[in-house]
Amino acid sequence: MTDRITLKEVADAAGVHMSTASRALNEQTRDVVNAETVARVLKAARRLGYTPNPLARGLRTNRTMTVGMIIPDIENPLFGPIIAGAAARLGSDGYSLLIADADLKDQASVARVIETLIDRRSDGLILATSARSDPTVAELANRNVAAVLVNRTADASPLPSIVGDDHEGIGLVVQHLVDMGHTEIGHISGPQTMSTGHGRYQAFLSWTQSLGVEVAPTAIEEAAWYRVEAGLHATSALLERRPDITAIVCANDLLAMGAYRAVRQKGLRVGADVAITGYNDTPLLDLLEPPLTSVRVPYRQMGSEAAGLLISMLSSDNGSGSPVSLRLTPTLSVRGSSGPHS
Amino acid sequence: MTDRITLKEVADAAGVHMSTASRALNEQTRDVVNAETVARVLKAARRLGYTPNPLARGLRTNRTMTVGMIIPDIENPLFGPIIAGAAARLGSDGYSLLIADADLKDQASVARVIETLIDRRSDGLILATSARSDPTVAELANRNVAAVLVNRTADASPLPSIVGDDHEGIGLVVQHLVDMGHTEIGHISGPQTMSTGHGRYQAFLSWTQSLGVEVAPTAIEEAAWYRVEAGLHATSALLERRPDITAIVCANDLLAMGAYRAVRQKGLRVGADVAITGYNDTPLLDLLEPPLTSVRVPYRQMGSEAAGLLISMLSSDNGSGSPVSLRLTPTLSVRGSSGPHS
DNA sequence: TTGAAAGCGCTAACAT
DNA sequence: ATGTTAGCGCTTTCAA
């Protein structure tokens, strides 16, 4: 690569000492320097194409202006918007985003990846990985690492989190199904080890109860993973047991895809015979026949807010004002898969 | 964060000088040091939990062990696997991945993002953005920045690239359609400003010709963007003009989704009346009715190969052995959308 | 085989 | 308002 201009060269070109050039270039300390000098330094810097060496600066200031993000499996379409939102917010504050993807099934890999990011001297971490009981969350808090959870959270997490409001989201779904005249409503829950799976399950119980919909334990089936196949099996089991069910609330879109298949395998029609709803409003699933009714979560904003929260944690010199977790409000995209009770 | 152990502390603990500790810790120079001393230093380092400060090291060595990656729009599901593949390969070689997403429609934003990555002293760059004529590609080459193009390439690119073999992929599709008895085959091409759009278009012409399928210019329609709506409009226009067409090769899956709609709007059945094929084999689209026939590109491998190529460029002390571009072989996923000619 | 010393480029006390 | 100085933690000559 081209040889880089150093601060000293800029200073020489401007006829001032290095430290004066440093002060002139730094917004914080600029006002201490003679205005005319500042102009001269800035001009020289621009002319020479000076860009500060972040390593030298970081070595001195002990900040890298880098944030690490751990993604469980980056191929999940969920994370694109989260990354994009975080990257944009970080970039506008001068931070860069270090990405590491870890295999969630392999706890050791998660730990290793986190260590890498810390060893890199990331100023803070954004975690998209956590299960409800995740030892690393507590450990990071203990080690006093600045970190934020996004999308999922841990039980009684010592780390702040930005998540979707699952209670609200499931409420929209259940309310909608009730409005459509359904009374026999089932639930394909996500894994109860994840906050989303657990939260949506609890929300389902809570809303059906408060809306006066009776839900027997037989109307609920847990999927072990967020996968199409798991949704297929769970729904098959559910329909076998409870053929009277006319609407199924799925804990996410992949499970809903499995439910589509199961319903069809039973010779029933999605939407007309059995209403199905998803969660996440994954792109392209509105192209299905029938298009999937799903809860839209503002994932891009989620990434952005997580970054913002972390930045505020990093820049609060005082330890005051403990950072506040956020619960983002979802909306319901009503489509053909959730027809009226016939 | 916790106070970090420095090399000096390790050296003191081991009762040697800092420079000896440095040599003992570095694989390259370890053999210069007394074996017993090495053991003592390593033990001390492990006991104290020493991790080298990458900023100090980078400042000294002028390498950050960081690679920057520019993504056009990270929300495109294409890039998840590419990122994952690259991150894995880089990680195993001690590199970290800096991600920046740029708005492709905004050339200035692309340039800004690239500068950020360079200013960060990334050792090299992976670009997933380039159009066929992209000034930044030439500029990077001129500036002698180590960089690799992935997924797309530029015309006569001075930078090596890892892309899918579009000629091969379209060949699989056309051959398949011919096998199914189709003789009136149309093409919804991608934007000709992108190498994928152009390459697949050329491949379509080439394969139809060599397989003896006559293709009038009226059988081809260009979509201005890779979007569902563009596919819808283009396909509508195509079918309006050429109602005799029984098979449509789409330049990517989103365009194919638009084609589904257009075909249905004409009161025709996808698969039975008009065969449709896509490109990319986007997850979940096999769940459509009918499931989409599409060309599968090994995107994860693509990311991995790109990283590997860049690493080899970075570590070749000699300027010899110019890096070799790669063209990865795709496969065809045949599904219900490409039925036989009836 | 090991130690001493310099310096990568920057910031921040301290001095003027 | 500006210059002097020290030092962040490391690698790497040069000496011993």
Image (spheres, coloured by chain):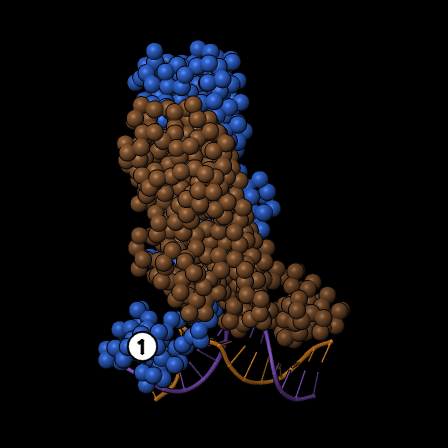
Chain colours: A blue, B brown, C orange, D purple
Question: Considering depth in this image, is A75 or B336 the residue closer to the camera?
Answer: B336
Position of residue A260 measured from the top left corner of the image (x, y, whole percent): 44, 22
The residue that appears at 34% across and 47% down in the rendered structure is: B191
In the rendered structure, the answer to whether residue A301 lies left or right of residue A121 reads left
Q: How many marks?
A: 1
Q: Residue at x 54, y 69 (%)?
A: B57
x, y percent for residue A230: 53, 27
Q: Does the rendering let one see residue A240?
A: yes
Height in image: B206 above or below B38? Answer: above
SS assignment at label 1:
helix
- Viewer-nearest residue: A240 or B162: B162
Splitting the image into 4 quarters, where does residue A300 fall? top left
As displayed, is residue A41 above or below residue A71? below
Taking the view exactly as shown, the residue that stands out farthest to the left is A36
Q: Residue at x 36, y 74 (%)?
A: A50
- State which quarter of the image contains the C terminus of chain A: top left
Please indicate whether residue B176 sits to the left or right of residue A322 in the image: right
Q: Position of residue B244 (x, y in %)?
A: 34, 29
Q: Is residue A62 visible?
A: no
Whether residue A78 sits left or right of residue B44 in the image: it is: left
Residue position for label 1: A47
Q: Position of residue B25 (x, y in %)?
A: 65, 67
Give whichever of A327, A1 is nearer the camera.
A1
Q: Residue at x 39, y 49 (%)?
A: B198
Q: Chain of mark 1?
A: A
Q: Crowding at label 1, few (<14), some or many (≥20) Cα neighbours within 10 Å?
A: few
Please identify the quarter of the rendering in which residue B260 is found: top left
- Give amino acid for label 1: Arg
Determine whether A126 is above or below A227 in the image.
below
